[in-house]
Image (spheres, rainbow, N blue to C red):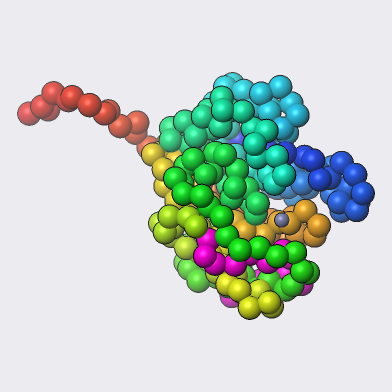
């Protein structure tokens, strides 16, 4: 198989000014593309909300194996057309990795069918991410747990469908727990939701987080399996 064609999508609003521009001078998408771009297996492009069709034209999506999504303050700014296009591509087999506040993005909410809300608090608390499925490909090469000294806190209940596979559970120093690594299949596509990545912390420059995104992209890429025939079907025998 050739390279994994990765599109890193970001709404790219927070990082245009102030302290967050200092943390992510090239945007969160730029940081993720830079970290994953060190690996030969990827062919990476980035796309942002302010581009025509949010950078997600039919052609771009057709040439994307795995789409990474970060959004926060302007989920509503993503058009119906692009939302539906992303959902359809996932159902047709494109992988989707949804990060942090992307849990409230329009494509993810539509694919889940629930509101996808949770508790949250910005309080510089510690997050400890426990690997609870060490044999899963997304956990390859990780230690038993990862600690992020400061992150935004999310807490259960996380209003999503029960994941097909749950890879990580986070504990926060304020007391909450959260299902922070959730795998889903929708149609022919694989979806991975990963919790960390608040814009005020340099989380996406970490090697362990990059390892998880790398593993997740490999897991979520299209399998190359047969396209099923649906509807009336003549007997083979
Ligand atoms: Zn956040």
Work out whether 150 lies above or below 50: below
x%, y% of residue 134? 50, 69
x%, y% of residue 15? 84, 45
Q: Quadrant of ligand 1?
A: bottom right
Q: Which residues are magenta?
A: 139-158
x%, y% of residue 193? 55, 53
Q: Tell me which residue sits at (68%, 28%) in the image.
A: 54
For residue 209: magenta? no
x%, y% of residue 236? 12, 27
Q: Can you see residue 59?
A: yes
For residue 141: magenta? yes
The answer to which image quadrant residue 223 occupies is: top left
Q: Nearer the viewer, residue 11 or 183?
A: 11
Work out whether 48 lies above or below 168: above
Question: In the figure, is residue 41 to the left or right of 159?
Answer: right
Question: In the figure, is residue 173 to the left or right of 182?
Answer: right
Question: In the figure, is residue 220 to the left or right of 204?
Answer: left
Q: Tell me which residue sits at (53%, 44%) in the image.
A: 108
Work out whether 12 lies above or below 195: above
**Quadrant for the C terminus in the image:** top left
């Amino acid at each position: 198989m050739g390279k994994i064609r990765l599109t890193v999508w970001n709404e790219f609003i927070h990082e245009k000014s102030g302290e967050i521009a200092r943390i992510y001078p090239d945007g969160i998408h730029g940081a993720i593309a830079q970290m994953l771009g060190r690996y030969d297996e990827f062919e990476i492009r980035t796309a942002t909300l302010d581009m025509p069709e949010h950078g997600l034209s039919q052609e771009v999506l057709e040439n994307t194996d795995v789409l990474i999504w970060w959004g926060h303050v302007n989920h509503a700014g993503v058009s119906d057309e692009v939302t539906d296009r992303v959902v359809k591509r996932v159902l047709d087999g494109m992988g989707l990795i949804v990060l942090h506040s992307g849990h409230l993005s329009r494509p993810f909410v539509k694919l889940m069918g629930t509101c996808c809300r949770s508790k949250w608090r910005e309080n510089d608390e510690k997050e400890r991410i426990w690997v609870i499925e060490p044999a899963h490909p997304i956990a390859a090469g990780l230690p038993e747990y990862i600690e992020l000294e400061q992150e935004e806190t999310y807490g259960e209940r996380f209003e999503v469908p029960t994941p097909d596979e749950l890879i990580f559970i986070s504990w926060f120093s304020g007391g909450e727990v959260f299902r922070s690594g959730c795998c889903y299949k929708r149609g022919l596509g694989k979806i991975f939701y990963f919790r960390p990545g608040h814009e005020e912390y340099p989380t996406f420059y970490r090697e362990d987080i990059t390892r998880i995104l790398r593993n997740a992209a490999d897991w979520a890429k299209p399998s190359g399996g047969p396209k099923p025939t649906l509807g009336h079907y003549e007997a083979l025998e």
